[in-house]
Image (cartoon, helix red, strand yellow):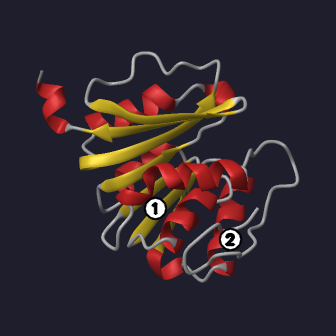
Amino acid sequence: MRVIAGNLRGKKLLTPKDEGIRPTTDRVKESMFNLISGYIDEDAVVYDLFSGTGGLGIEALSRGAARAYFSDNGRDGYRITGENLDACRLREKAVLKFGSYRKSAAEFPEKADLVFLDPPYDMNLWKEASDYLIENERLNDGAVIVMEHPVENKLNGINKALDLIKEKKYGVIVVSVFCYNSKSEEK
């Protein structure tokens, strides 16, 4: 696993030895970032919830995002994310929290412009996590939420404040990209 583009292009990232963490493959990550390339700028604040290796947030920082906030409630994911941040010398642009996505997001000092939701597939947390971010005002208007999920999970019941703007299938994985529109909540 490596950083695909930006100032850290080609940098190898640590990966887990066990199967409890499922890092996004380089192929899917590259395609995912092609889908959202216009949404990352020098002011972008990123949340990488369920960070695992931190690969998605690190990729966003490499491509010019201002800051990234990482969260994982697994000891291995937390450790590996921290080691990858250190290896990439990104600690000045990053905050890493150990604990649930709820606890961590509540403590992040800024609202997000870009969120990566790639929870363990068996936990089915895409709707719950995105609802939490909306209900607790953790998103800037126009924020983009990227959800990586298995093909068989159709993401039913996603909050009406999230407009599906792009979706792409990669084998057994789907990347769904939503845009947060606070005015949609009022309808």
* Measured Cα–Cα span from mark 1 to mark 2: 14 Å
Mark seen at residue 69: 1
Residue 31, above or below 173: below
- Are the residues tagged 1 and 2 within 8 Å (C-beta)? no
Question: Please, what secondary structure does the residue beneath circle 2 have?
Answer: helix
Can residue 106 be seen from the camera position used here?
yes
Residue neighbourhood size for the residue with mark 1, other residues' Cα within 10 Å, grouped as few (<14), some (14–19), many (≥20) = many
Residue 138, above or below 160: below
> Residue 56 vs residue 178: left or right?
right
The residue sitting at 49% across, 48% down in the picture is 116
Residue 116, above or below 15: above
Residue 152: give x, y in percent of width and height: 64, 18
Please state, as top left, top right, bottom left or bottom right, where the N terminus lies in the image: bottom right
The residue sitting at 75% across, 55% down in the picture is 76
Q: Which residue is mark 2?
A: 84
Amino acid type, residue under disc 2 in the picture: Asn
